[in-house]
Amino acid sequence: MGARKHIAAEKRKEAKKSLYFAKLVGVPSSPRKMRYVVDMIRGMEVDRALGVLRFSKKKAAIDVEKLLRSAIANWEQKNDRKAEAGELVVSRVFVDEGVTMKRMRPAPQGRGYRIRKRSNHVTLFVDSKNTANE
């Protein structure tokens, strides 16, 4: 790796140290279904978001709740203290499309219908309230 790339990589690594996030890769549900759940909690306080996810009837909410708890734990680990009530906010959260498994289903007259089994990747950022406002 050249010196310029090495310096740029070090800058990216330093910038990531101040971010508190968690990633969920390869969730076996469609991105559209996951975005519906993620849109419910975007910008919320963490405690309220956990409550919304806990009582949601969507199956994707279970995965997002686990991811949110992981992001909170990452924040606590980097700051060496427990998060107080109402201190953290879901600052950014987005869903990207993952790999799509392609399958065939038998159809009439010797044809085959294609089935696409989609997956997604979720990235969730948490931040303290005063930092998120600025």
Image (spheres, grey):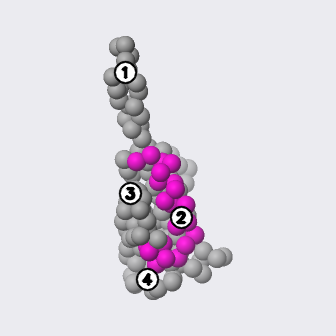
Q: Residue at x 43, y 73 (%)?
A: 50
Residue 101 picture quarter: top left
Q: Amino acid at mark 4?
A: Ala
Q: Is residue 36 above or below residue 74?
A: above
The span shown in magenta is: 29-51
Label 4, residues with CA under 10 Å away: few <14, some 14-19, many ≥20: some
Q: Secondary structure at mark 3?
A: loop
Could you tell whether 87 is left or right of 69 in the image?
A: right
Predominant secondary structure, magenta span: helix
Residue 79: give x, y in percent of width and height. Answer: 43, 79
Q: CA distance from mark 1 to mark 4?
A: 55 Å
Marks 4 and 3, the one that precedes in the sequence: 3
Seen from this angle, which residue lies furthest top? 109
Q: Residue at x 40, y 31 (%)?
A: 115
Q: Which is nearer the eye, 116 or 109? A: 109
Q: Which residue is mark 2?
A: 40
Marks 1 and 3, the one that precedes in the sequence: 3
Q: How many marks?
A: 4
Seen from this angle, which residue lies furthest right? 134
Residue 83 is marked as: 4
Q: Secondary structure at mark 2?
A: helix
Q: Which residue is mark 1?
A: 107
Q: Is residue 110 above or below residue 94?
A: above
Q: Secondary structure at mark 4?
A: loop
Q: CA distance from mark 4 to mark 2?
A: 22 Å
Label 2, residues with CA under 10 Å away: few <14, some 14-19, many ≥20: some
Residue 121: give x, y in percent of width and height. Answer: 44, 51
Frontmost of labels 4 and 2 is: 2
Marks 2 and 1, the one that precedes in the sequence: 2
Residue 87: give x, y in percent of width and height. Answer: 51, 83
